[in-house]
Structure formats: C-alpha cells, structure tokens
Amino acid sequence: MSFLFSPQLLLAAFVGAVMELDTYFVGMTLFSQPIIVGGITGLIFHDLTTGILIGSIVQLIWISPPVGAYVPPSSTAIAFTATALALNLPTYVTQSNPQELMMYHQSLLMYSIALGVAAGYYVGQADIWNRKLNTIIVHIFEPGILAGRQSSVFAVQLFSVLAKFLKDFIGIVLVLGLGVELAAKIYNSLPSEVIEGLSRALWLMPVIGLAVVYELFRSKFGSMIHIVSFIVCYILLLNNVINPLFLTLIVLIVCSVVVYTFVWKKKDVLNGKK
Amino acid sequence: MEKNKVIRTRDLIWSGMKLNFLQASWNFERLQNVGFLFSIYNMLRKIYIGNEEGRLAAVKRHMAFFNTHIFFSSAALGVITRLEADISDSDIKKKDTEIENAKMGIMGPLAAIGDSLFWSGIRPLALLLGAGIVWITDFSLPGWVIASLTALVAYNLPRFIIKYFLLFKAYFNYKDLFILIQQVKFQEIMKSIKAVGMGLLGIITAIYMVRNEIHITDNNVVMDDVLIIFWFLVISWALRTKKSVSNIFIAVVVISILISYIT
C-alpha cells in the first residue's frame, strides 16, 4: 500500500489537523505546541525520542508570540512535518557511507526541520486565506443572524472550523503522502558537503532556541540571574554532583525567593509596609 | 422577574466555555464579532425573553467589530451582559450607543494586559519549563509526559482562574472590576516571570552544554563549549538588532554548509 493511503498517515493527518485548530482558532490551550505535537507525532510513527527532540528544538526557536501584523510560521506545522519527515525519510534515503551513519542521521533531522519550516510558512500564510474565507462565510449567514436565527451563528462557527480542519487535513495528506519520496530524492542528490553542513547546523539549532528565550526574557535583573544560574549549574553538572531534576527544583525555589526579595519585598519596603 | 436576575451562574459558565470559540470565525472585516455573539447568545435569549425586537437589536449590535485578548474577553462578556440586562429598552438607539461605547472602551486595555501577561509571560515560561524537563529527562516517555502536563497546568490553571474570575466579577460587580485591574501589579508580575524564566534558562543552557553529544570540533569539549557561547552571543545580538528568527535560522543553515565547503 502506498504511503499516501496508509492508515498511519491518515491518523497523523487527523491528529495534526485537530491540533492545528488549537493554535489560534479554538481554545489556544497549548496542546498544539511543538513540544506536545512532536511527541504525539513521534508516537504515531513509532519513535517518540526523535519526536520529542525535534519538538523541543522547534519549541524553543519559535517560542515568541506573534507581534503586530506579522504572520509567523506555524510552529505546530513545523514540529509535525519535521517529525513525520524525519521518521519516514530513512526508508527512502540511501546512505553512501555506513561509517558516517551518525552524520547522516543528524543531517536528515536538520533536513526535515528545514522542510518543516517551509511547511510552517505555508500553513501560516494559508491561515490568512482561512480568515478571508471566514469573511465570506459571515456574509452568507449574516441575513439569517440578523433575522434572529441562532442556528446561523452556529453555522458560521461550524463552517469556519470545518474549513480550517479540512484544509489542514488534506494539506498534510498531500504534503506527506506525495512529498516524502520527493524529499528523499532531493536528499539523495545532495553533495556530501551539504550533508555535512546540515549536520553542523543541527548542532546550532538549540543555541538559536536558547538565544531566542534569552532575548524574550532579557532584563538587567534577569541577565544577572541567568549568568549566576548558568555558572553554578554548569559546574555542578560537569562534576556530576547533583541530579539535574533536583537541581532544577532548587533553581526554581531560589529564583522565587530572589524574586520575592528583590521585586515584591523591595516594593513593600518602598511603600512603607514591613 | 428583573432582567438581571434571569442570568444564573450556569449561564455564565456555559458562555465562558463558548468563549473558547471566540476566534473560530475570526475575519478581516469585523474580527471576533461572530465569536462574541456566539458566546453571549444564550444570555441574550434569557434577557430578552418575550421581547423579540430587543433581542434582534442586541444581535445586530453584537455583529459589529469586536477584538480583544481571548482569555480577557470574559471581562468584556460579563460587563456587556450586565449592561444588556440593566439598560432600559425604551430607547434602543441610546442603548446601542452606551453598549457600543462600553465595548470600545474595554477591548483595548484588556487586549494590552492579556497580550503582555500571557503571550510574553505565562506562555513562554510554561513552554520553557516543559522544554527544560524534556531535556533534563533525556527525551524519555515519562519525562515527556511530566513536561507536557507541567506546561499545560502552568499555562491553563492561571488561564482558567483569570477567565472565570473576570467573568463573574465583571457580571456581578463590574464597577469594581476596573479599580481591581488597576491595582494588579502587572509590572512586578512580568518582572518576576522573566526573572524565574532566566534562572530556568541558565540551567537548561548548562544541561545542553554538559550533555551535548554532537561535537563539531574533534571531540574537544572545551572548544565546543566556547563555540556554543560564541554563537549564543552572535544570535542574541542578531535578535537584538531585530533580525527575524526565521532569517537567523536560514543564515545558520547557509553558514554551516559554507563552512563545510571551506574546511
């Protein structure tokens, strides 16, 4: 059976389209964030670890909220497409040198993320079409709404959500169903320098994410906390002194105490409260 | 029965749930208008029971432009429902103007507070916490489940509390609502969220550097760490000069490929 009609792809497309609804149109509960989407897509294609790895990298890079009229790429679509491609491409990709398996694996992950970004841009732009379509749907049902029919209000909501869902479902089936083999053919034709370069780029992806979060939270006070936290944790973790999960808990408690002392208590003292 | 007595707690809860669909039919013409009407409709039916003309006028009113932050929209819903019930129907034009003015007056401030608190504060902090736990637990299934639940709770708990608190406060005591909002120390809250986020980022950066298994130098860990810090500073600088994340992503891929051709 072709991948285009496999139940796995249809399930993935259904889950992906439902999750896409949560990005903006319904709820915005965070279920659609890459860290969750990556894991779920990984589960569908039987490799949770790769899904979580891609999801967490994409999450950090595209953690910032959209500002103003700028339409960002859909981070949900990036995580979903990148994970699905990373887990299906190996079937079609030929490795010229088995000794460089690790490099090929890394470059394939990076290649999938890059294609995921392209898909994310497409979905971001396609959401603009959805919003234009919503205007038409509202116009169609407006006479009914103004005549007092509650069913017309419900119909506007239903058809808008349905249009978004169907567009994403069909988009995912077509992009993955037809795109995996094409993407593999392109990958197979890449020069070894490009493969090596993609492998190097993967190494830098988490650094982009860390820098994005740093800039999002940056303040004089916050930067000081970041430097102290980084140096202390780096030394402790390098010498294997403490369990990282326990260390995270300590960092959160210490940060909360510091914030209480220097942000809230200071304010009370200035206001004359003790 | 007085009109403001016909709305019960369950009506408000039901409308609050329907606010999850506020942006379902977001359109470029009047933005969230149908989403807002969809949320308030069940209460309009009760307020205007036996008054078809009043209900149609209210429906027409709420087909006008509406746009605010999705989670803070509950405050607008509460206030507007209260005004729909309280203002007399004797002069529909006057009622239209009063409600329209109230809507216009509260949409902007609510959107500003919501954007700042959720999009720049609670949301990235919850996601950073989730991503951090995933890295700490080595991308394992239990770690991912804990990370996902932590992020979901850290984000959705304040979302739920704020949404319903504002809805009930706005409906039952809207005059005090604005005094209350003014009293909330948003600057301090944001400063606290950012400081805790930075502390968390410190440990995540340390974990990435200590556990990083991809080496671009010949297994020279110190050189790798120096390069990570160098690139971190370069990318931070690029972000500070308003370069978009996507452009930085493309630049990193292109530079990495170029380096491979050179070396």
Image (tube, coloured by chain):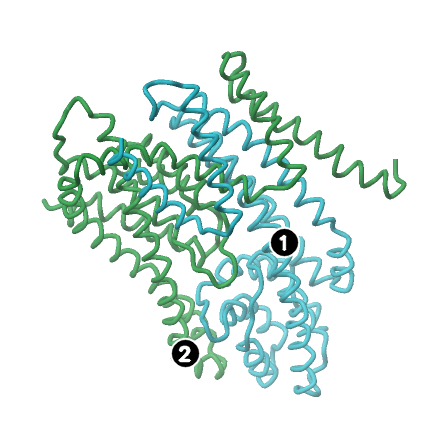
Chain colours: A green, B cyan
Secondary structure under the numbered disc 2 in the rendered image: helix
Q: Quadrant of residue B27?
A: bottom left
Image position of B198 (left or right of B136): right
Q: Chain of mark 1?
A: B
Residue A113 place in picture, x, y as percent = 31, 42
Which residue, as the protein is rendered here, is positioned at the far left? A1
Residue B164: mark in rendering? 1
Q: Quadrant of residue A99?
A: top left
Residue B236 place in picture, x, y as percent = 50, 41
Q: Residue at x 75, y 35 (%)?
A: A262
Circle 2 residue: A141
Camera-side residue of A80 and A157: A80
Q: Quadrant of residue B14?
A: bottom right
Secondary structure under the numbered disc 1 in the rendered image: helix
Cβ–Cβ under 8 Å for marks 1 and 2: no
Q: Residue at x 38, y 18 (%)?
A: B220
| Image position of B95 with respect to A162: above or below | below
Camera-side residue of A142 and A53: A53
Which residue, as the protein is rendered here, is positioned at the far right? A272
Type of the residue with mark 1:
Tyr
Residue A131 place in picture, x, y as percent = 40, 68
Camera-side residue of B150 and B231: B231
Type of the residue with mark 2:
Phe
Residue B89: mark in rendering? none
Q: Chain of mark 2?
A: A
Q: How busy is the neighbourhood of tag 2: few (under 14 within 10 Å), some, or many (20 plus)?
A: some
